[in-house]
Amino acid sequence: MLIFRKVSDICPWLDDQMKRDHSVGFIPTMGALHAGHVSLIQASKTANNNHGGGVTICSIFINPTQFNDPKDLEKYPRTFDADCKLLTEASCDVLFYPAVSEIYPPNLKEIKVDLEGLDQILEGEHRPGHFKGVVQVVHRLLDIIKPHYLYMGQKDFQQFTIIRHMIKNFNMLTQLVVCPIAREPHGLAMSSRNVRLSDTGRMLAGMIYSILQKGLALRNVKNPQCVCDFCFESLTVEPFKVEYVLIVDTRHLKTISNWSDSGEKVICIAVWLEGVRLIDNIVFQ
Ligand code: AMP
């Protein structure tokens, strides 16, 4: 696997790939890689590498501007050697591992995009400034890599919804591919932050997904608000602390008040456990 640390090194290499008509699949991450990240790499490899002439690029960059809590940034797991091993095993072609100064040079223009309220709900309500940082970093990475395909996880539902909006807003040529949530055997959505949970916490955290499933199973007898209340109350037990449970439509992220509201919906949850903030969601019709 090739490792690039500088924009001035990866750009000529990318130019060469373009000249050869190679399609480029890109997976931006913050490292501490797990099977969820690997599933995105595999999706890219299947679509790009396997049909000849294509490459898969993963980036590892812990983006300081998207952390509203400095302690969270400080505690974010950093496992570079293990990440490289995992990427090599997954046959990733390139790792882009830039320093902060490469991503945010002094002359960089601030990206302004009207998110049309997509950032005002769910994570946006509880993590002020978070999506401004996400838009900034993904825009910069797409500007450097210019991938044909961008792979993101459904796990961060609001994140990919906002990036899809940004790509459309700037008429970027990149196509977004959203991959399903990889879960641990007992249902917990895989996350880099899971390593900060105790063994007991990790087992208990499987409840989050099962409660969402149970809540949705009540759709025939309860309205959307009651389903959210059921999930909220079911997890209002030690050691959990629920931050929100909301059902929104998947396009505009507006709260659903009736099941008859048309279109695809998603139930989203954020829960604190042992000082770790966990998010999960289930998409349904
Ligand atoms: P992160 O390193 O947490 O910023 O995540 C990088 C990418 O991996 C994002 O597009 C995430 O949505 C995706 N991702 C994280 N966890 C999972 C998971 N459990 N399943 C699938 N994709 C995931």
Image (cartoon, helix red, strand yellow):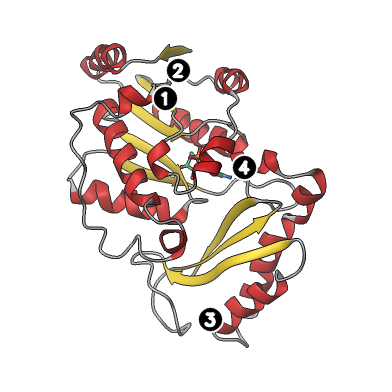
Distance from Cα at disc 2 to Cα at disc 3: 45 Å
Mark 3 residue element: helix
Distance from Cα at disc 4 to Cα at disc 1: 25 Å
**Is ligand 1 closer than 8 angstroms to the Cβ of mark 3?**
no
Say which of marks 4 and 3 sits in front. 4
Q: Is residue 23 visible?
A: no
Please report whichever mark, 4 or 3, sits nearer to the chain's N-terminal start. 4
Q: Is residue 122 left or right of residue 147?
A: right
The image shows residue 219, relative to residue 146, as above or below, that is below
Distance from Cα at disc 2 to Cα at disc 1: 5 Å
Residue 224, which numbered label?
Answer: 3
Q: Is residue 244 left or right of residue 256?
A: right
Query: Badge 2, how many Cα within 10 Å: few under 14, some, many 20+?
Result: some
User: Is label 2 in contact with label 1 (beta carbons under 8 Å)?
Assistant: yes
* Residue 61, percent from left and from top: 44, 29
Which residue was labeled with disc 2?
93
* Residue 115, percent from left and from top: 26, 58
Q: Nearer the viewer, residue 120 or 53?
A: 120
* Residue 205, percent from left and from top: 72, 55
Q: Is residue 78 left or right of residue 21?
A: right
**Is ligand 1 closer than 8 angstroms to the Cβ of mark 1?**
no
Which residue was labeled with disc 4?
193
